Image: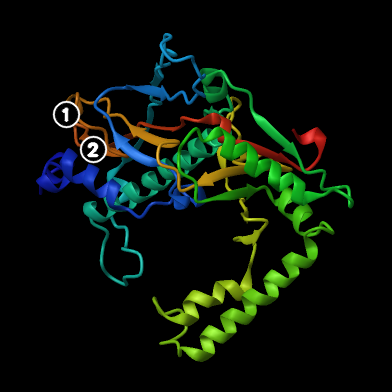
Amino acid sequence: MPNIVDVFSGDGFSVKELTDAINLFPNQYGLINALGIFSSKGVATTSVAVELNKGVLNLIQSKPRGTQATKNVRSKRELRYFEIPHLPLDDRILPSDIQNVREFGSPDQLKTPEKEVADRLEEISKKHDITYEYLKAGAIAGQILDADGSTLLDIFGEFGVAETGVNFALTTDTTKLQEKTQEVWGSIEDALEGDTLEGVVALCSPEFFKSLTTHPAVAEAFKEYQSNTVRMANILSNVVPASGPGIPGSVDQATEPLRRDVRKGFFWQDIWWIEYRGKATFLQEDGTTATRSFIAPNTCRFLPLGTQDTFRSYYAPADWMETVNTVGLPKYSKIVPDMGGRWVDIISESNPLPLCLRPKVLVKGARTSGDL
């Protein structure tokens, strides 16, 4: 009978096959990834150089004919370097993890090494995904944090800009929220510096979202939105017969979420407001775990949609001999068997860097002045 080293030495467990496999699992990044605002690019280095070309548009001063013309002011270029975070994650498969273990859902089929590797890769992939969502949440907040809360990258500091904050004063019934939303729109439009804009989305903490939708200036509009949403869902269900409950592509499946929950978003004052509950656990220094929300309590993050050059994601190559100077991929994985046949290590890593190249567009909304 071959030992564990022989079992895992086939082509199906090569670096290429396992890396392809871990990248084929459906993305679990979450809402920020689903917005599609970050354009992705693999790089062959462990740092990325970002060249900023700031165009200058200035009025032309009139001159008497025959005199010297005004000198054209050329655009200024800035080159900034950013280190790409290295996120390794390893696991170990022991013979006892497979031996005599029945395959889930099967009465008599035993688990195979291939299935155990696939299960581990899926779990590892999800952990990389939620970490990347966390990094993106930091990028849209101007501060990319490590799992322990320390700062990996202060985007505002690197670009020399101050964060824009808008106090919505949601605990005051007389607050003119329309003026607050206009302030948000104006701030984002002024900061785009020529980039495109299709709309604005607001990712709200649960506390901010509840205070917003119950505020006198919004409550009636939110109630009407709920009613219209349910009414439209019912109309669509009656006009076009569904092929069955929960069947992909059916009207029933498409409209049922609308009947259940509008926290996934409602449109008001030309802004798409979404309650964002992203959070994950992290390991503390004393060995215990704690939970961190990706959007700070009582706050909201406003983001421009449809931009071309404002949000970027970079991937560096893995820290392995096989991948030196190759174009980076979102995730990597390979197997390293123990030569004595006592275990097999699954080694994985991701090297992502999400960036906002125009941090002035990042507007923070606060429930009260104390939350700015």
Q: Quadrant of residue 191?
A: top right
Q: Are marks 2 and 1 in contact (CB under 8 Å)?
A: yes
Q: Is residue 113 shown left or right of residue 63?
A: left
Q: Secondary structure at mark 2?
A: strand
Specify whether residue 221 is in view. yes
**Residue where numbered disc 1 is placed:** 322
Q: Quadrant of residue 310?
A: top left
In the image, which is nearer the foreground, mark 2 or mark 1? 1
Residues 332 and 175: in front is: 175
Q: Is residue 307 above or below residue 340?
A: below
Q: Is residue 238 shown left or right of residue 93?
A: right
Residues 100 and 153: in front is: 153
Q: Is residue 136 shown left or right of residue 165?
A: left
Q: Is residue 314 shown left or right of residue 225?
A: left
Q: Amino acid at mark 1?
A: Glu
Q: Where is residue 182 shown, x and y percent of the image?
A: 69, 46
Q: Quadrant of residue 317?
A: top left
Label 2 and label 1: CA atoms lie apart by 11 Å
Rate crowding at label 1 as few (under 14), some (14 to 19) or many (20 or more) other CA atoms within 10 Å: few
Q: Residue at x 28, y 70 (%)?
A: 108
Q: Where is residue 35 shown, x and y percent of the image?
A: 47, 51
**Residue where numbered disc 2 is placed:** 334
Q: Where is residue 34 shown, x and y percent of the image?
A: 45, 53
Q: Secondary structure at mark 1?
A: helix
